[in-house]
Protein backbone atom coordinates (compact mmCIF):
# COMPACT_ATOMS: atom_id res chain seq x y z
CA UNK A 1 0.00 0.00 0.00
CA UNK A 2 1.66 3.20 -1.19
CA UNK A 3 1.97 6.29 0.98
CA UNK A 4 0.97 8.35 -2.05
CA UNK A 5 -2.47 6.70 -1.96
CA UNK A 6 -2.99 7.90 1.61
CA UNK A 7 -1.75 11.38 0.77
CA UNK A 8 -4.25 11.56 -2.08
CA UNK A 9 -7.00 10.32 0.26
CA UNK A 10 -6.24 13.27 2.56
CA UNK A 11 -7.19 15.55 -0.38
CA UNK A 12 -4.45 18.09 0.14
CA UNK A 13 -6.16 20.59 -2.15
CA UNK A 14 -8.96 21.00 0.40
CA UNK A 15 -6.88 21.24 3.58
CA UNK A 16 -6.26 25.02 3.35
CA UNK A 17 -9.95 25.43 4.20
CA UNK A 18 -9.47 23.94 7.67
CA UNK A 19 -6.49 26.20 8.38
CA UNK A 20 -7.96 29.42 6.99
CA UNK A 21 -10.67 29.94 9.61
CA UNK A 22 -8.28 29.41 12.50
CA UNK A 23 -5.70 31.80 11.01
CA UNK A 24 -8.36 34.43 10.44
CA UNK A 25 -9.49 34.12 14.07
CA UNK A 26 -5.86 34.40 15.14
CA UNK A 27 -5.73 37.65 13.19
CA UNK A 28 -8.85 38.86 14.97
CA UNK A 29 -7.16 37.99 18.24
CA UNK A 30 -4.06 39.98 17.27
CA UNK A 31 -6.16 42.93 16.09
CA UNK A 32 -7.93 43.11 19.47
CA UNK A 33 -4.78 42.47 21.55
CA UNK A 34 -5.84 38.98 22.60
CA UNK A 35 -3.60 36.79 20.45
CA UNK A 36 -2.29 33.63 22.14
CA UNK A 37 0.01 31.43 20.11
CA UNK A 38 -0.38 28.04 21.85
CA UNK A 39 -4.19 27.75 21.62
CA UNK A 40 -4.00 28.88 17.99
CA UNK A 41 -1.41 26.20 17.19
CA UNK A 42 -3.53 23.55 18.92
CA UNK A 43 -6.65 24.78 17.10
CA UNK A 44 -4.79 24.49 13.79
CA UNK A 45 -3.84 20.90 14.60
CA UNK A 46 -7.40 20.04 15.64
CA UNK A 47 -8.85 21.56 12.47
CA UNK A 48 -6.37 19.75 10.26
CA UNK A 49 -6.97 16.37 11.90
CA UNK A 50 -10.75 16.83 11.81
CA UNK A 51 -10.75 17.62 8.09
CA UNK A 52 -8.49 14.70 7.24
CA UNK A 53 -10.82 12.44 9.23
CA UNK A 54 -13.78 13.89 7.31
CA UNK A 55 -12.06 13.27 3.98
CA UNK A 56 -11.23 9.69 4.98
CA UNK A 57 -14.83 9.15 6.14
CA UNK A 58 -16.20 10.55 2.89
CA UNK A 59 -14.11 8.14 0.85
CA UNK A 60 -14.99 5.13 3.01
CA UNK A 61 -18.72 5.75 3.32
CA UNK A 62 -19.16 6.76 -0.32
CA UNK A 63 -17.48 3.48 -1.29
CA UNK A 64 -19.62 1.54 1.17
CA UNK A 65 -22.77 3.17 -0.20
CA UNK A 66 -21.80 2.46 -3.81
CA UNK A 67 -21.56 6.16 -4.63
CA UNK A 68 -18.04 6.04 -6.09
CA UNK A 69 -17.08 4.30 -9.30
CA UNK A 70 -13.84 3.47 -11.06
CA UNK A 71 -12.73 6.21 -13.46
CA UNK A 72 -14.76 9.01 -11.85
CA UNK A 73 -14.18 12.62 -12.92
CA UNK A 74 -12.49 13.66 -9.69
CA UNK A 75 -9.19 12.54 -8.17
CA UNK A 76 -8.53 8.84 -7.81
CA UNK A 77 -10.34 7.25 -4.86
CA UNK A 78 -8.00 4.75 -3.22
CA UNK A 79 -10.68 2.48 -1.75
CA UNK A 80 -12.77 2.35 -4.93
CA UNK A 81 -9.74 1.70 -7.09
CA UNK A 82 -8.43 -1.02 -4.75
CA UNK A 83 -5.35 0.88 -3.59
CA UNK A 84 -6.56 0.96 0.04
CA UNK A 85 -8.68 -1.66 1.75
CA UNK A 86 -12.05 -0.53 3.19
CA UNK A 87 -11.01 -1.77 6.63
CA UNK A 88 -7.82 0.26 6.58
CA UNK A 89 -9.69 3.40 5.53
CA UNK A 90 -12.32 2.93 8.24
CA UNK A 91 -9.61 2.45 10.86
CA UNK A 92 -7.72 5.52 9.62
CA UNK A 93 -10.93 7.56 9.80
CA UNK A 94 -11.61 6.82 13.45
CA UNK A 95 -7.98 6.92 14.56
CA UNK A 96 -7.58 10.38 13.02
CA UNK A 97 -10.89 11.51 14.51
CA UNK A 98 -9.82 10.20 17.92
CA UNK A 99 -6.56 12.16 17.66
CA UNK A 100 -8.55 15.29 16.82
CA UNK A 101 -10.77 14.70 19.86
CA UNK A 102 -7.75 14.34 22.15
CA UNK A 103 -6.31 17.64 20.90
CA UNK A 104 -9.72 19.30 21.20
CA UNK A 105 -10.26 18.09 24.77
CA UNK A 106 -6.83 19.33 25.85
CA UNK A 107 -7.47 22.64 24.13
CA UNK A 108 -10.77 23.19 25.92
CA UNK A 109 -9.37 21.93 29.24
CA UNK A 110 -6.56 24.49 29.29
CA UNK A 111 -8.08 27.45 27.44
CA UNK A 112 -11.82 27.00 26.91
CA UNK A 113 -15.12 26.79 28.76
CA UNK A 114 -17.44 23.87 29.56
CA UNK A 115 -19.90 24.73 26.76
CA UNK A 116 -17.18 24.06 24.19
CA UNK A 117 -17.26 20.32 24.94
CA UNK A 118 -20.76 19.89 23.42
CA UNK A 119 -19.64 21.93 20.42
CA UNK A 120 -16.64 19.62 20.06
CA UNK A 121 -18.89 16.57 20.24
CA UNK A 122 -21.14 18.11 17.59
CA UNK A 123 -18.08 18.68 15.40
CA UNK A 124 -16.97 15.06 15.81
CA UNK A 125 -20.44 13.85 14.85
CA UNK A 126 -20.39 16.26 11.91
CA UNK A 127 -17.22 14.64 10.58
CA UNK A 128 -19.11 11.35 10.19
CA UNK A 129 -22.60 12.75 9.53
CA UNK A 130 -21.30 14.58 6.47
CA UNK A 131 -21.02 11.25 4.61
CA UNK A 132 -22.83 8.67 6.75
CA UNK A 133 -25.71 8.04 9.09
CA UNK A 134 -29.44 8.02 8.39
CA UNK A 135 -29.29 11.40 6.60
CA UNK A 136 -25.80 12.10 5.19
CA UNK A 137 -25.50 15.86 4.78
CA UNK A 138 -23.44 15.68 1.59
CA UNK A 139 -26.07 13.46 -0.08
CA UNK A 140 -28.98 15.82 0.53
CA UNK A 141 -27.79 19.22 -0.66
CA UNK A 142 -26.54 20.29 2.78
CA UNK A 143 -22.81 19.97 2.20
CA UNK A 144 -22.28 23.67 1.62
CA UNK A 145 -24.27 24.56 4.74
CA UNK A 146 -22.13 22.12 6.73
CA UNK A 147 -18.96 23.77 5.41
CA UNK A 148 -20.16 27.23 6.45
CA UNK A 149 -20.88 25.89 9.93
CA UNK A 150 -17.88 23.60 10.50
CA UNK A 151 -15.22 25.53 8.54
CA UNK A 152 -16.45 29.06 9.15
CA UNK A 153 -18.60 29.65 12.22
CA UNK A 154 -17.08 27.05 14.56
CA UNK A 155 -13.33 27.56 13.90
CA UNK A 156 -13.50 31.36 13.78
CA UNK A 157 -15.76 31.81 16.81
CA UNK A 158 -14.15 29.15 18.98
CA UNK A 159 -10.56 30.09 18.14
CA UNK A 160 -11.30 33.71 18.97
CA UNK A 161 -12.97 32.70 22.25
CA UNK A 162 -9.97 30.54 23.17
CA UNK A 163 -7.83 33.67 22.94
CA UNK A 164 -10.15 36.36 24.29
CA UNK A 165 -12.63 34.46 26.53
CA UNK A 166 -15.46 36.43 24.93
CA UNK A 167 -17.37 36.39 21.66
CA UNK A 168 -18.63 39.73 20.26
CA UNK A 169 -21.46 39.59 17.72
CA UNK A 170 -19.27 40.92 14.90
CA UNK A 171 -17.02 37.86 15.18
CA UNK A 172 -20.04 35.71 14.31
CA UNK A 173 -20.77 37.78 11.19
CA UNK A 174 -17.17 37.53 10.05
CA UNK A 175 -17.23 33.76 10.61
CA UNK A 176 -20.15 33.41 8.20
CA UNK A 177 -18.11 35.26 5.58
CA UNK A 178 -15.18 32.88 6.02
CA UNK A 179 -17.58 29.96 5.82
CA UNK A 180 -18.99 31.26 2.54
CA UNK A 181 -15.48 31.33 1.08
CA UNK A 182 -14.94 27.76 2.26
CA UNK A 183 -18.23 26.60 0.76
CA UNK A 184 -16.87 27.59 -2.65
CA UNK A 185 -14.31 24.79 -2.45
CA UNK A 186 -17.10 22.24 -2.09
CA UNK A 187 -19.05 23.95 -4.85
CA UNK A 188 -16.17 23.37 -7.28
CA UNK A 189 -15.93 19.74 -6.15
CA UNK A 190 -19.64 19.06 -6.57
CA UNK A 191 -19.85 21.11 -9.77
CA UNK A 192 -17.16 18.86 -11.27
CA UNK A 193 -18.77 15.65 -10.02
CA UNK A 194 -22.41 16.53 -10.77
CA UNK A 195 -22.86 13.97 -13.55
CA UNK A 196 -21.25 11.15 -11.54
CA UNK A 197 -23.28 12.07 -8.46
CA UNK A 198 -26.54 12.25 -10.38
CA UNK A 199 -25.90 8.81 -11.86
CA UNK A 200 -25.60 7.19 -8.41
CA UNK A 201 -28.42 9.14 -6.76
CA UNK A 202 -26.24 11.45 -4.67
CA UNK A 203 -28.21 14.69 -4.37
CA UNK A 204 -25.61 17.38 -3.90
CA UNK A 205 -26.63 21.00 -4.31
CA UNK A 206 -25.07 20.98 -7.78
CA UNK A 207 -27.32 18.06 -8.76
CA UNK A 208 -30.41 19.72 -7.27
CA UNK A 209 -29.89 23.25 -8.62
CA UNK A 210 -27.76 22.59 -11.69
CA UNK A 211 -24.38 23.91 -12.75
CA UNK A 212 -25.52 27.35 -13.89
CA UNK A 213 -27.00 28.17 -10.48
CA UNK A 214 -23.90 26.86 -8.73
CA UNK A 215 -21.65 29.15 -10.78
CA UNK A 216 -23.57 32.19 -9.57
CA UNK A 217 -23.63 30.94 -5.98
CA UNK A 218 -19.85 30.54 -6.23
CA UNK A 219 -19.52 34.14 -7.40
CA UNK A 220 -21.87 35.52 -4.73
CA UNK A 221 -20.17 33.57 -1.93
CA UNK A 222 -16.86 35.29 -2.66
CA UNK A 223 -18.44 38.73 -2.56
CA UNK A 224 -20.40 37.84 0.60
CA UNK A 225 -17.20 36.64 2.23
CA UNK A 226 -15.47 39.96 1.59
CA UNK A 227 -18.53 42.02 2.56
CA UNK A 228 -18.79 40.30 5.94
CA UNK A 229 -15.07 40.54 6.72
CA UNK A 230 -14.16 43.94 5.26
CA UNK A 231 -15.09 45.85 8.47
CA UNK A 232 -12.18 44.07 10.18
CA UNK A 233 -9.86 45.20 7.39
CA UNK A 234 -11.12 48.78 7.67
CA UNK A 235 -10.40 48.77 11.42
CA UNK A 236 -6.94 47.38 10.80
CA UNK A 237 -5.27 49.65 8.25
CA UNK A 238 -5.60 52.68 6.03
CA UNK A 239 -5.13 50.81 2.78
CA UNK A 240 -7.80 48.34 3.85
CA UNK A 241 -9.08 47.78 0.32
CA UNK A 242 -5.89 46.18 -1.08
CA UNK A 243 -6.25 42.60 0.19
CA UNK A 244 -10.05 42.39 -0.29
CA UNK A 245 -9.65 43.96 -3.74
CA UNK A 246 -6.99 41.45 -4.80
CA UNK A 247 -9.13 38.60 -3.45
CA UNK A 248 -12.14 39.75 -5.48
CA UNK A 249 -10.12 40.14 -8.68
CA UNK A 250 -8.71 36.63 -8.34
CA UNK A 251 -12.13 35.31 -7.34
CA UNK A 252 -13.70 36.73 -10.50
CA UNK A 253 -10.87 35.14 -12.53
CA UNK A 254 -11.59 31.76 -10.92
CA UNK A 255 -15.30 32.24 -11.57
CA UNK A 256 -14.57 32.79 -15.26
CA UNK A 257 -12.58 29.55 -15.34
CA UNK A 258 -15.35 27.71 -13.54
CA UNK A 259 -17.71 28.83 -16.29
CA UNK A 260 -15.45 27.50 -19.05
CA UNK A 261 -13.89 24.29 -17.71
CA UNK A 262 -15.38 20.82 -17.38
CA UNK A 263 -14.57 17.47 -15.80
CA UNK A 264 -11.06 16.78 -14.54
CA UNK A 265 -9.90 20.20 -15.76
CA UNK A 266 -11.77 21.66 -12.76
CA UNK A 267 -9.67 19.82 -10.17
CA UNK A 268 -6.86 22.44 -10.06
CA UNK A 269 -9.54 25.12 -9.63
CA UNK A 270 -10.60 23.42 -6.41
CA UNK A 271 -7.11 23.84 -5.00
CA UNK A 272 -6.89 27.42 -6.28
CA UNK A 273 -10.15 28.34 -4.54
CA UNK A 274 -8.95 26.83 -1.25
CA UNK A 275 -5.54 28.49 -1.55
CA UNK A 276 -7.08 31.89 -2.29
CA UNK A 277 -9.17 31.59 0.86
CA UNK A 278 -6.10 30.62 2.90
CA UNK A 279 -4.05 33.51 1.50
CA UNK A 280 -6.83 35.97 2.32
CA UNK A 281 -7.00 34.77 5.92
CA UNK A 282 -3.24 34.40 6.35
CA UNK A 283 -2.70 37.94 5.02
CA UNK A 284 -5.16 39.30 7.54
CA UNK A 285 -3.37 37.41 10.32
CA UNK A 286 0.07 38.72 9.25
CA UNK A 287 -1.11 42.33 8.92
CA UNK A 288 -2.93 42.19 12.26
CA UNK A 289 0.06 40.63 13.99
CA UNK A 290 2.45 43.18 12.51
CA UNK A 291 0.20 46.09 13.43
Image (tube, rainbow, N blue to C red):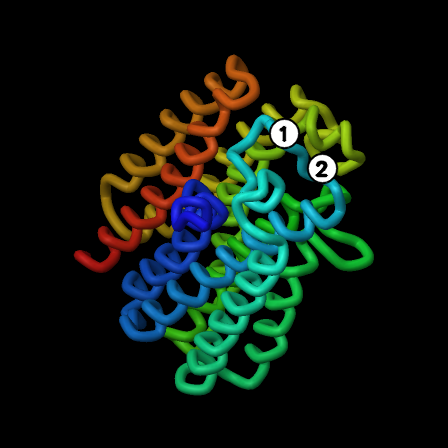
Return the x and y of residue 74 as percentages of the image width and height: 55, 31
Circle 1 residues within 10 Å: few <14, some 14–19, many ≥20: many
Q: Residue 33 has which mark?
A: none
Tell me the residue that label 2 is attached to.
Answer: 204
The answer for how far apart the CA atoms under marks 1 and 2 are is: 9 Å
Q: Is residue 63 above or below residue 98?
A: above
Identity of the residue drawn at 52% across and 69% down: 95
99 displayed left or right of 64: left
50 displayed left or right of 61: left
Q: Secondary structure at mark 1?
A: loop
Q: Is residue 289 visible?
A: yes
Identity of the residue drawn at 25% across and 56% down: 288
250 displayed left or right of 142: left
- Labels 1, 2: front one: 1
**Chain-order first, disc 1 or disc 2:** 1
Q: Is residue 213 above or below residue 161?
A: above
Identity of the residue drawn at 52% across and 54% down: 151
Q: Quadrant of the C terminus?
A: bottom left
Q: Is residue 230 visible?
A: no
Q: Quadrant of residue 277?
A: top left
Q: Are marks 1 and 2 in contact (CB under 8 Å)?
A: yes
Return the x and y of residue 120 as percentages of the image width and height: 57, 73
Q: Residue 193 has which mark?
A: 1
Q: Secondary structure at mark 2?
A: loop
Choose between 158 and 91: the one closer to the eye.
91
Return the x and y of residue 93 as percentages of the image width and height: 56, 61
Q: Residue placed farthest to the top in the image?
A: 260
Identity of the residue drawn at 66% across and 46% down: 143
Q: How many marks?
A: 2
Amino acid sequence: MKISCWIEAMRLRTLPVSLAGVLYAAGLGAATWHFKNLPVIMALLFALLAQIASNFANEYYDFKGGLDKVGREGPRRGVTEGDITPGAMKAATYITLAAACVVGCLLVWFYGAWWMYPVGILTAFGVIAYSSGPYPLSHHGLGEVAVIFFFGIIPVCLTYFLQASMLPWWIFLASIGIGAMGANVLIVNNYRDADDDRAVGKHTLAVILGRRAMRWIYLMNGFAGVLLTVPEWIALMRLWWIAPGIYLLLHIFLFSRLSRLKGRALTPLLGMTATLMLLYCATYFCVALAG
